[in-house]
Amino acid sequence: MKILVVGRAGQLAWELRRTLACFGEVVALDRHSEPAIDLAEPGAVAAVVRAVRPDLIVNAAAYTAVDRAEQEPELAWKVNAEAPSVLAAEAARLGVGLIHYSTDYVFPGDGAVPYREDDPVGPRNVYGRSKLAGEQAIAESGAAHVILRTAWVYGVRGQNFMKTMLRLMAERALVRVIDDQRGAPTWVRMIAEATAILVARSLRAGLADLSGSSGVYHLTCSGQTSWYGFACAIREQAVAAGLLPDTAARVEPIPTSEYPTPAQRPAYSVLDLSKLEERFGIAPPDWRHALELCLADLAGQ
């Protein structure tokens, strides 16, 4: 089986290249590879897919600069909405499946219980609206597809909240972190491993058959916390792992109002995971356990 992973150096794509290799040839492409695939140029995407002729497409690339998207809405729309539409159309033309990753930011964040896949959406920023448009285009394409909504993604590679906190805690005496936004911190390796399980359980005659599983699924670590709670756990576990000294910065909670950003974030974006477990038997670990494993991996490098 030949798997086209759209994305190459990003934190999710890098993990997927490892977890999906057991299924066959993984062709990971981005705008710097040869051949190159640039989601900012949706019109050129189809030709690359046709040249590769994959048996499965996994789109791990996205425009994820949430605040910058408010100033670059056209670029965010091309990468997050138009390009996935092209990928889905090509998947339908080839008769292959598409796995795509979306976000908790498609929800308004004004609830108090975990969002289910069929709950009303209502993104509050350009990033969320562009990702929702990508979901809708894929659903309307006729391609067999699995859309995995995730949230608060971190890992040892790339730029993310965990790595930012580790840097700031080593440099400062005090780090102030928002305590009135709740979600589920999610280790990127868990996403990649869950994707591999999903593929394995969709195999028919050596190929991934997503036709009986098409739809949206929520995939995060289990449990929930605030950004402040996440930061406190990072500090505690990083000190235990030897990544930070006991004298690392103290963490202080603040309300969102004290840290204004160009893009509005949902106050509550915890996702219900029951559909994923019912369909694929995937029960994600608690976010604290996943963080401990990630920091242990970082400490071992």
Image (tube, helix red, strand yellow):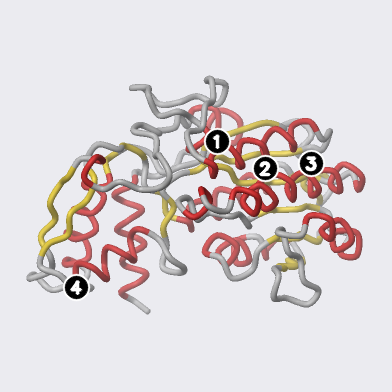
Mark 2 or mark 3: which is in front?
Answer: 3
Report the front residue among 216 and 213. 216
Q: Which residue is mark 4?
A: 170
Report the front residue among 296 and 270. 270
Label 4, label 3: how many angstroms apart (C-alpha)?
A: 47 Å
Disc marking residue 281: 1
Q: Judging from the image, what secondary structure is the residue with disc 3 in?
A: loop
- At a point 35% along the width and 58% down the height, the residue shown is 161
Q: Earlier in the sequence, mark 1 or mark 3?
A: 3
Tell me the kind of residue under disc 3.
Asp
Label 1, label 4: how many angstroms apart (C-alpha)?
A: 40 Å
Disc marking residue 209: 3
Q: Residues within 10 Å of mark 4 (few under 14, many from 20)?
A: some
Q: Earlier in the sequence, mark 1 or mark 4?
A: 4
Query: Which x, y percent locates residue 219?
Result: 51, 40
- Write down the quadrant of residue 295 in the picture: bottom left
In contact (CB < 8 Å): disc 1 and disc 3: no
Label 1, label 2: how many angstroms apart (C-alpha)?
A: 9 Å
Tell me the kind of residue under disc 4.
Ala
Report the front residue among 236 and 175. 175
- At a point 37% along the width and 24% down the height, the residue shown is 110
Q: Which residue is mark 2?
A: 201
Q: Judging from the image, what secondary structure is the residue with disc 1 in?
A: loop
Mark 1 or mark 3: which is in front?
Answer: 3
